[in-house]
Image: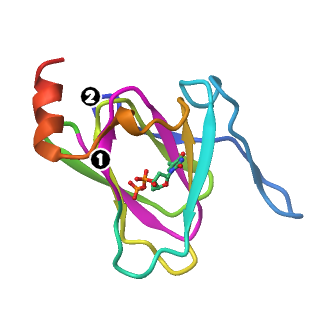
Amino acid sequence: MKNGVEIINLPKILDPRGNLSIIESEVHIPFKIRRTYWIYDVPGGDVRGGHAYRDNEEFVVALSGSFDVVVHDGVEEVRYHLNRSYNGVFIPKMMWRSLDNFSTNSLAMILSSTDYSASDYIRDFDDFKREKNNE
Ligand code: TYD
């Protein structure tokens, strides 16, 4: 996608004892990791997110199960289905994004570039489009 959103494939070390994947800050993803959180026990049909960040960038991985990451850049929306633990979606700042279509027992890991800051959130889609157009 020309707006910088992309699926990044991570290293996968195949091993008969079990596979191993790696994320190194600023090596496999294009930002320094400041914060990690994860979303789990999502009831069927529920949606997480539904906001943009002014500064925060993130990388989202389905460590277990599957879900969709829906990203809107103010013009178009793209849906990414994640169901592998060796890839993820990079989402630059100023993208409207939500997570939905969670499978049972799915685990979403999100790596973030900034500390948590409530004031970094844009929670209204019209406000997002206005700020995006003024960039
Ligand atoms: P929020 O990002 O609003 O969740 P959603 O994915 O549904 O948009 O976060 C939900 C709550 O968790 C909110 O009260 C803030 C808190 N929270 C933190 O304290 N630190 C964090 O790093 C995150 C992501 C959330």
Examine the image and state in which quarter residue 28 appears. Answer: top right
User: Is 111 drawn above or below residue 63 in the view shown?
Assistant: above
Nearer the N terminus, badge 2 or badge 1?
2
Mark 2 lies within 8 Å of ligand 1 (Cβ measured): no
Q: Position of residue 30 (x, y in %)?
A: 53, 24
Residue located at (62% from left, 31% from top): 34
Q: From this viewpoint, which residue is outermost toward the top?
A: 135
First to last magenta residue range: 49-72
The residue tagged 2 is: 2
Whether ligand 1 has any atom under 8 Å from the Cβ at mark 1 is answered as yes
Q: Residues within 10 Å of mark 1 (few under 14, many from 20)?
A: some
Question: Residue at label 1?
Answer: 51
Q: Residue at x 58, y 56 (%)?
A: 38
Q: Looking at the image, which is closer to me, 53 or 59?
A: 53
For discs 2 and 1, the disc positioned in front in the rendered view: 1
Which percent across, then down, holds residue 36? 62, 44
Is residue 110 positioned above or below 5 on the image? below
Whole-Å distance between the Cαs marked 2 and 1? 20 Å
- Which corner quadrant holds the C terminus? top left
Instruction: Look at the image and say whether residue 14 sits in the magenta stretch.
Output: no
